[in-house]
Image (cartoon, rainbow, N blue to C red):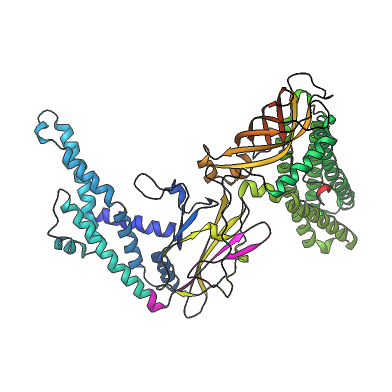
């Protein structure tokens, strides 16, 4: 029994190392203290998580045992010490829980009630036996644990006989860790540790005290309670006021104009480029159909042409949707946002599939070029090359945002190179636990990332033996307030001087976010970038009496889809007219010539 438990224990330890082999661990310490559980330990969601609050502190723990284990494994050296340390650490993590359970069981067992309820006493004794065996088998990790435990003869209390094993395990752990450091020192294990702030435009090296000579960034705390408008928002609000005044009688014509732009974008995409390519492919197929040596190319070309025609028909159906879209009483308005987003996703995936088929056809042409006339070979190569280039250009323009929202932007690990300012340090000399305050990362925006890179080096060859990179997305995860500006379409409940059902008006919203959905904000990049919602105060400036003097409306607003959609009820303080409103932050056509 003991042997089985021993093997199980070491297996758990070994699996832990094989599964993780983390060179370092990152624990987020947020400003509100939510990262701690009732026992004062870090919650799982805050350890090595991909998302952190933009103003948090990152607590970094260097996993020395895993580093040396990776080094030894690379060198073909035994890993007994590192494996034993991992097993001991796993045991000591359970110490508090196991000893409390033993103590509770001992105090609960009432032998005087044995005659009345023997089954209950037997169950309690069996549970106690299981826990006692668990403690007893700690000695199987190292042969010295029993002797060391016996030396703690002065331990008293109901759990003294059990706590001695844990005390001995701690002594052995300290001894084995010393061996590990001696090994690391003898082998000359060295490391580099660096950090970068990654924005849409650049990668900024960050200073980590004790690990580099990089100049520190200016300390900056992102505003959590952003009640006041920024200078940029004030200017935008002034521009929107002017724009609304110029278009106040157009009602929903602005949205109609946007749908027209979407129709034009799809037409330009589906007709101008790809219909011509499909027709050209068909023309060349006819020249090749009588040649059996290129049957594979003919079949692939037919499939590609057919797929392009299907693509065009799908585009026609999407255009029909926009042509038939009506905005009476606001219906179908909110559907517009999701439909345009759906279009972007559709063209993204479809064009990627067509690109793969085109590339495959091009490869087949290159392999069979000896059997084709130079003219046909060159024609097909030009068709496919053009096709692939166009798709690449569209993918690069339009799919990046969608993929970033759904999956998060892919980290270019190769671009994270240590500069000469990052120090190569001995593993035995570095800090094993330290903090990095994100406010020391300089100016940051939501969606920026912090990348952390840890590399282990071989003394003899000076080569990287193992490298680990972690990326952490920065968002406002905690409860916060943001201010937004834009345009709403107001519909008064009572007759006014406006000639259309809806009047355009600039607005200012004060939104309260993150008070219910913290868990989702911590888990999902998509939620933070596209699906989050808010509720708050709304102020807008309609002109219901059309005297060219903006009035003041105030009310309540609810936003969804990252504030792309908003609606609420407000009251015109000047005229006394209540009104409902909606606003859209509509994504402009994202795959047409507008983006060129």
The segment highlighted magenta reads: 184-212
Which residue is nearer to you in this view: 100 or 345?
A: 100
Rendering quarter of residue 334:
top right
Camera sees residue 366: yes
Q: Return the residue found at the far bottom.
A: 460
Which residue is nearer to you in this view: 333 or 359?
A: 333
Does the segment drawn in magenta span residue 264?
Answer: no
Q: Return the residue found at the far top.
A: 494
On screen, 74 above or below 42? below
Residue 100 x, y percent position in the rendering: 24, 46
Residue 22 x, y percent position in the rendering: 45, 60
> What is the total number of numbered labels drawn onto the structure image?
0
Which residue is nearer to you in this view: 538 or 461?
A: 538
On screen, 192 above or below 269? below
On screen, 338 above or below 397? above
On screen, 561 above or below 48? above
Q: Is residue 526 left or right of residue 46?
A: right
Residue at 85 percent across and 36 percent down: it is 246
Q: Is residue 205 left or right of residue 393?
A: left
Residue at 79 percent across and 35 percent down: it is 318
Does the segment drawn in magenta span residue 202?
Answer: yes
Residue 196 x, y percent position in the rendering: 58, 63
Residue 297 x, y percent position in the rendering: 79, 53
Which residue is nearer to you in this view: 94 or 69?
A: 94
Camera sees residue 334: no
């Amino acid at each position: 029994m003991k042997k089985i438990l021993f093997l199980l224990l070491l297996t758990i330890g070994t699996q832990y190392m094989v599964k993780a082999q983390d060179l370092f661990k990152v624990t987020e310490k947020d400003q509100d203290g939510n990262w701690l559980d009732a026992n004062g330990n870090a919650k799982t969601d805050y350890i090595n998580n991909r998302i952190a609050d933009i103003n948090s502190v990152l607590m970094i723990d260097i996993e020395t045992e895993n580093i040396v284990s990776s080094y030894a494994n690379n060198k073909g050296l035994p890993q007994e010490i590192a494996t034993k340390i991992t097993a001991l650490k796993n045991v000591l993590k359970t110490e508090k829980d196991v000893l409390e359970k033993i103590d509770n069981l001992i105090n609960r067992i009432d032998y005087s009630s044995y005659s009345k309820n023997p089954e209950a006493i037997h169950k309690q004794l069996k549970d106690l036996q299981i826990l006692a065996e668990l403690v007893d088998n700690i000695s199987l990790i190292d042969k010295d644990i029993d002797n060391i435990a016996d030396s703690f003869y002065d331990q008293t209390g109901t759990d003294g006989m059990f706590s001695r094993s844990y005390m001995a395990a701690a002594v052995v752990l300290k001894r084995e860790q010393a061996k590990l450091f001696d090994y690391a020192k003898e082998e000359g294990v060295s490391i580099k540790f660096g950090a970068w702030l990654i924005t849409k435009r650049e990668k900024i090296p960050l200073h980590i005290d004790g690990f580099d000579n990089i100049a520190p960034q200016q300390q900056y705390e992102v505003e959590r309670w952003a009640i006041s408008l920024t200078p940029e928002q004030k200017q935008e609000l002034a521009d929107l006021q002017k724009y609304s005044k110029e278009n106040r009688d157009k009602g929903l014509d602005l949205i109609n104009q946007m749908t027209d732009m979407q129709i034009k974008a799809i037409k330009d995409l589906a007709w101008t480029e790809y219909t011509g390519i499909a027709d050209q492919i068909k023309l060349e197929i006819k020249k090749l159909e009588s040649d059996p040596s290129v049957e594979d190319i003919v079949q692939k070309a037919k499939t590609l042409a057919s797929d392009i025609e299907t693509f065009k028909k799908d585009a026609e159906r999407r255009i029909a949707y926009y042509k038939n879209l009506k905005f009476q009483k606001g219906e179908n308005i909110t559907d517009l946002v999701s439909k345009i987003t759906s279009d972007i996703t559709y063209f993204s995936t479809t064009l990627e599939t067509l690109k793969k088929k085109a590339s495959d056809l091009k490869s087949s042409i290159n392999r069979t070029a000896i059997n084709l006339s130079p003219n046909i070979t060159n024609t097909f190569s030009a068709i496919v090359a053009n096709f692939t280039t166009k798709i690449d250009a569209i993918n690069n323009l339009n799919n990046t945002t969608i993929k970033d929202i759904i999956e998060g932007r892919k980290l270019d690990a190769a671009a994270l190179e240590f500069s000469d300012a990052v120090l190569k340090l001995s593993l035995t000399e570095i800090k094993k636990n330290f903090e990095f305050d994100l406010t020391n990362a300089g100016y940051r925006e939501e969606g920026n990332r912090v990348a952390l890179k840890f590399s282990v080096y071989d003394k003899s060859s000076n080569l990287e033996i193992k490298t680990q990179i972690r990326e952490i997305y920065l968002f406002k995860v905690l409860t916060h307030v943001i201010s937004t500006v834009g345009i709403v379409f107001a519909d008064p409940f009572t007759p006014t001087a406006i000639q259309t059902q809806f009047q355009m008006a600039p607005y200012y919203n004060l939104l309260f976010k993150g008070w219910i959905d913290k868990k989702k904000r911590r888990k999902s990049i998509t939620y933070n970038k596209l699906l989050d919602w808010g509720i708050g105060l709304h102020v807008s400036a309609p002109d219901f009496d059309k005297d060219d003097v903006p009035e003041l409306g105030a009310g309540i607003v609810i936003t969804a889809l990252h504030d792309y959609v908003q609606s609420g009820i407000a009251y015109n303080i000047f005229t006394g007219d209540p009104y409902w409103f909606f606003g859209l932050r509509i994504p402009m056509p994202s795959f047409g010539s507008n983006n060129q």
